[in-house]
Image (cartoon, rainbow, N blue to C red):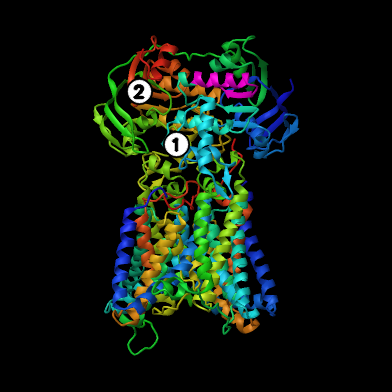
Amino acid sequence: MAGKKFSRTWLTPVVAVLVAFAIGAILIYLQGADPLKAYQSLFSNAFGSWSGLAKTLGKATPLVLSGLAVTIGLRAGLFNIGVQGQLIMGAFAAAWAGYFIQGLPIYVHLPLALLFGVAFGAGIGLIAGALKAYRGIHEVITTIMLNSIILALVDYLAGHVFQEPGQILARTPHVLPSATIPKIFSLPSGFFFAILLAYLVWWVFQRTTSGFRLETVGRNKNAAWYAGISVKRSVLIAMAVGGGIAGLGGGIESLGVIGRFEPTFNTGLGFDGITIALLGRANPLGVIPGAILIGGMRGAAASMQFDAGVAPEIVDLILALVLFCVTAPFLAKWLKSTEVGAKISSGWGN
Amino acid sequence: MKKFLSFKWSLTLLLIVITGYFYSKDGVITSSVISTALIFGLPLALAAMVGIMCERTGIVNIGIEGTLLFSAFVGFFTASATDSDFYGVIAAVLAGTASGVMLAFMSISWKMDQIIAGTIINILATGLTSFLYKQGHTAPTTSQIDIPLLSRIPFFGQVLFMHGPIVYIGLILIFVLYIALFHTSWGLRSRAVGEHPGSADTAGVSVFKLRYLNVSLAGAVGGLAGAYLSLELVGSWDRGFTAGKGFTALALMIFGRWNPMGALAAAMFFGLTQAVTNQLMFSQIVKIPDQFVNMLPYILTIVVLAISAGKVRPPAAEGQQYEKEQA
Amino acid sequence: MSALLDITNVTKTFPGVVANENISISVAAGEIVALLGENGAGKSTLVKSVFGMVRPDSGEIRIKGELITPGDTSGAIARGVGMVHQHFQLVPVMTVTENIILGDEPKRGIFLNMKAARAEVLALSEKYGLEVDPDAFVEDLPVGTQQRIEILKALRKDVDLLILDEPTAVLTPQETDDLLQVMRNLATSGVGVLFITHKLREVMAVADRVVVLRNGRVAGSTSPKETDEEGLAQLMVGRNVVLQVEKGEAKPEAATLVITNLHVNDDRKHLAVNGLNLEVCAGEIVGVAGVEGNGQRELVEAICGMRPRMSGEVLVSGEATPDMHPHKVHSMGVSHIPEDREKHGLVSSYSIEDNLVLNQFDRDPFAKGWIRNIGALEENATRLVEEFDIRTPSIKTTAGALSGGNKQKVVVARELSQDTRVVVAAQPTRGVDVGSIEFIHNQLIAARDAGAAVLLVSAELDEILSLADRVAVMFGGKIVAILDAKEAERGLVGRLMAGLSA
């Protein structure tokens, strides 16, 4: 019984990924390149070497966290599609705290800077959450709008107010060593932290009353209210925690990978969180394999262009296809029943 | 839909008075600003029509952004390849229809959650266009058509009768949609399907077919809006150039209470704010960093939604799957 | 006379349930055939098959000799079949006229001809003696009027066969009699009538023939001349039916639930509960009788903290209950069996285990602080499933997979297994099979005997009359009479329910 369920649970995302890659192969071929060469380059660069793996895991870290953020929202019946903005906000805030606050030892400065990232990301999530809880505005619209607002805002801040002196490029000064995340065996330690967080989130949903509250709100708002659960509070918590986790992801990027904030530092991460969450069937642990896969793909995309002459945007396309395949018919019914029992399209009037 | 809000009418009156004042001060600039308001607002209005046509029939359409992006892309590159803006527009409309059919398929036949379906359309559109995009292409854009006689009228001539063809088509389309929705049997049935599908079904109306039809037609309208963006208003295509218009359109639809005329008015108002801001920036009257100007439409969208919240009544059955067989 | 409607060997199964098995019925022109059966016997499913709302797995349906394509709604309409649905298929935000013309609108060119439509509606209204205002919005109309619109909608085209699905559920006894007369008139004029109900009285009053369904099969076919109510009841449930529940004498003590001068608004901001006073003592069952739509739902919701009180008080053991906080009211010892179990009572995708602790999940022993105690959950569920006879493969089964009766038993189990001072039961046996109905009734009596004050609100007069120690009749938002069980005679209560004086 358990075995049957396991294979049914994981077969569909695997099949979806395979189908998407197959279609991608066709498109690559039509563009005049060799799909096998392209995929081989992609995977060997992503997973085939220690440095490749380090890059993969580094890219996977914010993805795990974005996926977690979306997953928490989904469980509570919300579609937090704005994790990208929350992540960027957190990245900026952490980078700023990383260089602006001086004279602290690493074991104070680093957590503090990360905390800035969490707080600002959570703040954005909270705005969207409040608009939903108190005005009934659907979070899909508000978070996408907030995304654009944040992008413009940090662009301005990094280019004018907090710009690195003497630089033409818009970016903040490099963070101090006391705020840089150290590597473990030259593997990004942020990744392992993200894994731990995923387990923590999973455990909260399985075993705690808070998790039960969020879950119940996601499945049946009316019954939840009737049972004494505050729906408004759950919405706020889910959006704030999601935003905070996304912000943490951004913080880790700034402090562990890039070392500063550059407005152009990530482009595709936004919707990847959604793909990862849905690939993982809205299960907090399920985001890990998806994040690693996508992290690998994105990290190795540039070398794929070099080796096989395929535009790196193929990754965007394949991921879009993965999302499409994952939510296709027989899966849509599955999605509705157990893990993602949430009713996301509640319309605009709440 | 039952009554005119006097707030709206007094606001309109105020705007007319203000416009008249500025016109007396500087006719050229004022006409230009109002005219710009129209051309900025039109794609939003058309995109809002897409939303209205879908939601009135009960389908929530989050994928308007993707439809705009995709059809703009197809239109632009078809026009470039065929060296004809006409074929470009046709191609865009077809592309839009295709995205509509796809949404219909996913949400009606596959019974997918409609918000996820719309998001998939957005992501697929972004991924596909991003991958296929090649820089450096140009395409013939549509030419302005001045309506004889009418375009000579001072002020109104410039504002209403000296535009590209899609503006005219678009405005007529919106008006036709309004009439159709409230005065034809298609409109009555569509609205019934969106409010209480069972009532239509038991009266012999095919909920399934009507939803498919409306969502696909809506896609076509979205295609027209996309064509307008790449072939008339902007004249080029770039990644992300739709800049959230598809989502703003939803806010306008809600604010306009799912009524084509209401959405049109809201879109025009939106266009006006952008036109005015541009003019202020251009004339150096106000100096705000670019980024904040860019933020304005998004902030405004949220504000519009926050105002309408709680007071609006969406079509009762929207977002829900219609299941015939219930034990 | 050839049959208008010929249903032959129709079978329809839904997952886990055989709704119709090999059913054959016919209705001739000018004949009133009653389709009788209790909740869940398969009546509605059968009729939906005729109308194309449901596709039968096998069998044939012929109308005037022509075979109907399964699932084709317009096929039935086109052949002159009209249907009055149990749950009205009307668009609330549209006018009466728009609702009636939907699907076959009078036109002028491509435009709707609303003038002609209005005229048509008025003419129809006159012809059948069913008064309606063509320009009113359906959502503003009372339920009885809405039904008139349903009927007019069905009669609009020349129908040869009219199907009515539980039409009297929301009518007063007087309105019911009016409706039965309309049916007789139709039959006299040559229309065939298929009339679905579970009310024996109506069957005896108006039917020419009766077909009884039980558990999806035809249990028997007879006519009022050949049988009586007991006979029909026997066919309906297949054994000697005890129409009265067995209960001992009530021993009421102090008044536990005291409601004073309560005013509550409905969803459209109209006053639904209008100065209501009622007391329920520990150890008694007070049944609130009344036609649906007289404020009962609003009353129940206000007592349980689900609807704001405009004015007035609700006291439980002397303490005032908080407004709009169902959980706090619950913790004062008020157990509630909600009217809409899918909406408020259960989370369908949760297991039975989780549902059984839905409103106490964060309390000892089900949680220690932040952490939930899975062992305690399992123990509780195993015990309750046994005690309340919940038929399920396992305690981990999702509640949504259970039958209506068992779902309701889960709710009842949860509510009645906690310490209760007051039990508020709203339509507790709606959509529940007979075996579970008996069980739930016995549970309510057990709660009463254990000292709880039980408030029973039900649209089924029989249920009230058999369970209640005192009967309170609700009309127009007020309690218009309180009768002792002995004095509560059906005709008297019926008149009071209709607002007439005793």
* Nearest the eye: C60 or C237: C60
Amino acid bearing label 1: Gly
Image: C24 above or below C140: above
The answer to whether residue B60 is seen in the rendering is no
Mark 1 element type? helix
Residue B298 position within the rendered picture, expressed as x and y whole percent measured from the top left: 39, 67
Q: Is residue B42 left or right of residue C186?
A: left
Answer whether residue C5 is magenta in the image.
no
Q: Are marks 2 and 1 on the same chain?
A: yes
Q: Residues within 10 Å of mark 1 (few under 14, many from 20)?
A: many
Closer to the camera in the image, C141 or C494:
C141
Crowding at mark 2 (Cα within 10 Å: few <14, some 14-19, many 20+): many
Q: Amino acid at mark 2?
A: Ala
Location of mark 2 (residue): C452
Residue B150 position (above or below residue C420): below
* Place of residue C323 in the rendered image (x, y in percent of width and height, measured from the top left): 29, 37
Q: Quadrant of the N terminus of chain C?
A: top right
Q: Chain of mark 2?
A: C
* Image x and y of residue C153, in percent: 55, 34
Please name the residue that numbered disc 1 is placed on.
C345
- The chain letter for the residue carrying disc 1 is C
Q: Quick one: SS at disc 2?
A: loop
Mark 2 and mark 1: span between their CA atoms?
20 Å
Is residue C186 located in the magenta-colored stretch of the structure?
Answer: yes
- Tell me the quarter of the picture where residue B78 sits: bottom right
Residues tagged 2 and 1 counted as in contact (Cβ below 8 A): no
The residue range painted magenta reads: C176-199
Q: Which of label 2 and label 1 is nearer to you?
A: 1
